[in-house]
């Protein structure tokens, strides 16, 4: 294969030896070569030739490291190993994408440092694009100065579209990790952004500039941050494009069936699975911080003893909520709103602790999202407190039993949403509650059968631990 790119030295001991799509890079460590990503099968010959042009011999490649397992980064590897005897590296979660072409010699784990000669490569696990995506960071010396290079191992968002994942028989769970990975990467300082596709850092354009410029155009400490901002926008656009209806599919404590409840991981996963609403629970810590936590006690989800309301926020920050091998931190209510308040989502905020209504209302007013929230509780008194203090807010009451007396009491207090347990939601009841002027939103949806029953009864929404299945059923996603 003839490359549509030219091989060239990018900066320090880093060389570009790839194609336009995908890129491959070579590090000359002084004690052997490291190749980062290979490409489709036909790229093998091109890489060998590119190396020759630059004065390198394929037999000197000691390590081949992969940003992730997709074939456009890995399928040429088997041939290059045959020619070089190099050892191969890949996060083991991505072996499935190799289709048996080779077996990696080393599993790249989060925080690993790959060392060879004068080069150390820090590997950060940044899942999303695939489960096993890894991003690389290393230093390059140019004209006596040291610069930090960084590669985001999986930045493309098209591969995270529902249609794509469904056609490939993959689930949507990793999508929930994508923006968390982006946020992690934003904390890294990068002077030289190395793309694993040439569109990411305009490899060809900057190479051309370098031919006539006195300075190295690849050195730009702002390019990394700008790129991460751009793909964040790309990603939310994908999510918006996939929405088609306005029935409210609330991810209950986030996508709590799959990942740790009431954490950023759960909220992101829920939204990326097709939820257009997020349900969450508020407690207030001993030092007065509103946090998102369901139980009064810590043990069920963190394994620690004690009550949330008797811990300080700082103490809670040391804990991890875990589920299915995932873990994430307890979230401050305001941090949640910092990230989600401006999104096209509805928020069902449940008061879990008496006497917290004012504080919650003040936070909602601060973020100016009065028209996007519904405040609920199983505790009628708490909903009434809210009705008195913040009459502008939409209110709902969670209950296992709906009586005419209750509905009358709710009307008096301007509580406009009835939130019945799913078991008592049927067409007749929904019709009655609607005709009395209530919005109907169910909770306690134990399985798909009940989920379908609630949809078919004509309710306006539900909280569900598996928003992917609901999205699939009602068509909030294409
Ligand atoms: O949708 C309301 C639901 O959250 C009530 O149950 O136990 O999750 O607070 P729970
Ligand atoms: Ca709740």
Image (cartoon, rainbow, N blue to C red):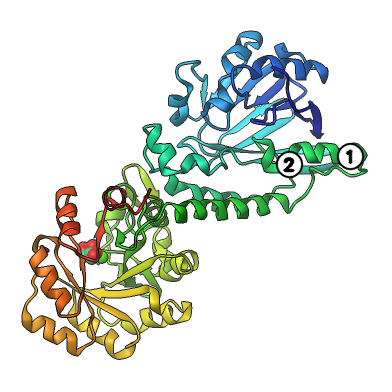
Q: Is residue 478 above or below residue 281?
A: above
> In the image, residue 381 lies at what x, y percent?
20, 83
Q: Position of residue 18 (x, y in %)?
A: 70, 26
Residue 31: x, y in percent?
A: 74, 20
Q: Please state if 413 lies on the left or on the right of 348 as rendered.
A: left
Q: Nearer the viewer, residue 470 or 126?
A: 470
User: For this view, does 245 lie left or right of residue 212?
Assistant: left
Q: Badge 1: how crowded within 10 Å, few (<14), some, or many (20+)?
A: few
The secondary element bearing badge 2 is classed as loop
In the picture, the disc for residue 143 is 1
Rendering coords of residue 51 (x, y %)? 76, 19
Q: Residue at x 14, y 68 (%)?
A: 430
Q: Which residue is mark 2?
A: 202
Disc 2 residue crowd, few under 14, some 14–19, many 20+, Cα 10 Å: some
Query: Residue reaching furthest top?
Result: 82
Q: CA distance from mark 2 to mark 1?
A: 23 Å
- CB within 8 Å, label 2 to label 1: no
Callout count: 2
Quadrant into which the N terminus falls: top right
Could one spot residue 311 in this view of the protein?
no
In front: label 2 or label 1 = 2
Eyeballing the image, is 66 above or below 145?
Answer: above
Front in this rendered view, residue 223 or 355 = 223
Res. 323 mark = none
- x 41%, y 63%: residue: 331
Looking at the picture, tell me which residue is in the foreground, 451 or 313. Answer: 451
Whichever of labels 2 and 1 marks the residue nearer the N terminus, that label is: 1
Ligand 2's image quarter is bottom left
**Secondary structure type for disc 1:** loop
């Amino acid at each position: 294969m003839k490359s549509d790119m030219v091989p060239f030295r990018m900066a320090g001991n880093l060389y570009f030896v790839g194609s336009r799509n995908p890129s491959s890079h070579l590090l000359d460590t002084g004690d052997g070569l490291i190749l980062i990503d290979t490409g489709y099968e036909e790229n093998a010959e091109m890489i060998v030739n590119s190396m020759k042009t630059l004065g390198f011999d394929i037999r000197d490649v000691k390590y081949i490291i992969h940003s992730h397992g997709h074939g456009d980064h890995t399928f040429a590897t088997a041939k290059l190993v045959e020619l070089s005897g190099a050892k191969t590296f890949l996060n083991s979660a991505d072996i499935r994408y190799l289709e048996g072409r080779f077996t990696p010699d080393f599993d790249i784990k989060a925080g690993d440092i790959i060392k060879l000669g004068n080069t150390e490569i820090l590997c950060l696990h940044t899942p999303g694009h695939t489960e096993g995506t890894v991003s690389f960071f290393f230093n390059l010396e140019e004209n006596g100065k040291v610069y930090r290079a960084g590669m985001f191992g999986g930045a493309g968002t098209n591969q995270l579209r529902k249609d794509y994942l469904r056609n490939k028989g993959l689930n949507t769970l990793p999508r929930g990790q994508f923006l968390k990975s982006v946020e992690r990467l934003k904390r890294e300082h990068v002077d030289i952004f190395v793309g694993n596709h040439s569109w990411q850092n305009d490899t060809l354009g900057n190479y051309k500039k370098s031919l006539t410029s006195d300075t190295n155009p690849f050195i730009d400490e702002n390019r990394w941050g700008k790129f991460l901002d751009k793909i964040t926008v790309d990603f939310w656009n994908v999510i918006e494009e996939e929405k088609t209806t306005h029935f409210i599919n609330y991810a209950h404590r986030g996508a709590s069936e799959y990942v740790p409840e009431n954490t950023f991981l759960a909220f992101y996963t829920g939204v990326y699975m097709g939820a257009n609403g997020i349900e969450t629970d508020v407690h207030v810590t001993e030092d007065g911080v509103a946090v998102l936590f369901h139980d009064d006690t810590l043990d069920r989800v963190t394994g620690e003893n004690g009550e949330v309301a008797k811990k300080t926020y700082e103490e809670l920050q040391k804990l991890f909520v875990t589920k299915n091998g995932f873990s994430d931190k307890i979230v401050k209510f305001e941090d949640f709103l910092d990230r989600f308040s401006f999104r096209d989502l509805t928020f069902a905020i449940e008061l879990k602790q008496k006497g917290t209504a004012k504080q919650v209302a003040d936070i909602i007013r601060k973020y100016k999202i009065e028209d996007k929230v519904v405040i609920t509780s199983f505790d009628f008194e708490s909903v009434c407190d809210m009705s008195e203090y913040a009459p502008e807010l939409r209110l709902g009451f969670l209950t296992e039993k709906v009586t005419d007396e209750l509905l009358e009491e709710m009307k008096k207090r301007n509580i406009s949403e009835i939130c019945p347990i799913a078991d008592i939601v049927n067409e007749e009841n929904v019709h009655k509650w609607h005709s009395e002027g209530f919005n109907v939103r169910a909770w306690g949806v134990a399985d798909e059968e009940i989920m379908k029953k609630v949809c078919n009864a004509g309710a306006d929404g539900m909280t569900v631990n598996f928003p992917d299945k609901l999205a699939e059923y009602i068509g909030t996603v294409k």
